[in-house]
Amino acid sequence: MTKLLLSVHVLAAILVVGPIAVAASMFPRHAQRSAPGAELLHRICRGYAVVGIAVPVFGIATGAALGVLTDAWLIASLLLTALAAGLLALSILPGQQRLLATPPAEEEPRRATAARLTMLTGMFNLLWAVVVVLMIVRPGSTTSA
């Protein structure tokens, strides 16, 4: 059962977080130019964010099956995951909506919002990179390589 949970967790992380990271990274450039794909990129981010709850759910289930829920590396990963999810839900997605709603004639506000979204998306992606490293290295684990 543990192998199945871990497999679903890893697949969900790859197939859900990956598209969000790519779409969110591409969004500011497309939206600033009023490119037609910007709306699609926003819908991808929003849709995959909802499905993304599967990643921590299966991660916690896997951690419980392995008996590592109280390990520091897992707790840190969960906190960073919650921080990334909060950043996406409370800053990135609303920022994307604001940028889509800003008329193209308002060049300066569009540029500022796009720059802020670029920074926030970079932070989101960095948080996930740290989580991946923690999942692989598992500091303090007796099974670390």
Image (spheres, helix red, strand yellow):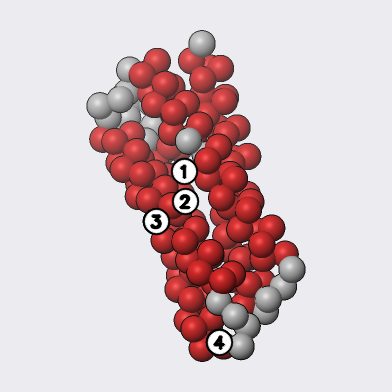
- How far apart marks 4 and 1 lie (CA) works out to 39 Å
Work out whether mark 1 precedes mark 3 in sequence or the reverse, and give the earlier one: 3
- How far apart marks 3 and 4 lie (CA) works out to 24 Å
Secondary element under disc 1, as helix, strand or loop, is helix
Image quadrant in which you'd find residue 102? bottom right
- How far apart marks 3 and 2 lie (CA) works out to 20 Å
Q: What amino acid type is highlighted by mark number 2?
A: Ala
Q: Position of residue 118 (x, y in %)?
A: 51, 70
Q: What amino acid type is highlighted by mark number 3?
A: Leu
Q: Quadrant of the C terminus?
A: top left
Secondary element under disc 3, as helix, strand or loop, is helix
Instruction: Write down the residue under mark 2.
Output: 129
Please say if 99 is above or below 75: below
Work out whether mark 3 precedes mark 2 in sequence or the reverse, and give the earlier one: 3
Depth-wise, is mark 3 or mark 2 nearer the camera? 3
User: For mark 4, does the 10 Å Cα neighbourhood hold few (<14), some (14 to 19), or many (20 or more) residues?
Assistant: few
Q: What amino acid type is highlighted by mark number 4?
A: Glu
Q: Position of residue 44 (x, y in %)?
A: 63, 51
Instruction: Write down the residue under mark 1.
Output: 132
**Residue at the spot x=34%, y=38% of the render?**
78
Please say if 124 is above or below 115: above
Please give the label number shown on residue 106: 4
Instruction: Write down the residue under mark 3.
Output: 90
**Residue at the spot x=59%, y=69% of the render?**
100
**Residue at the spot x=58%, y=63% of the render?**
25
**In the rendered structure, are the residues bearing label 1 and label 2 in contact, judged by CB atoms less than 8 Å apart?**
yes
Name the residue nearer the viewer: 53 or 106.
106
- How far apart marks 1 and 2 lie (CA) works out to 5 Å
- How far apart marks 1 and 3 lie (CA) works out to 22 Å
Image quadrant in which you'd find residue 87? bottom left
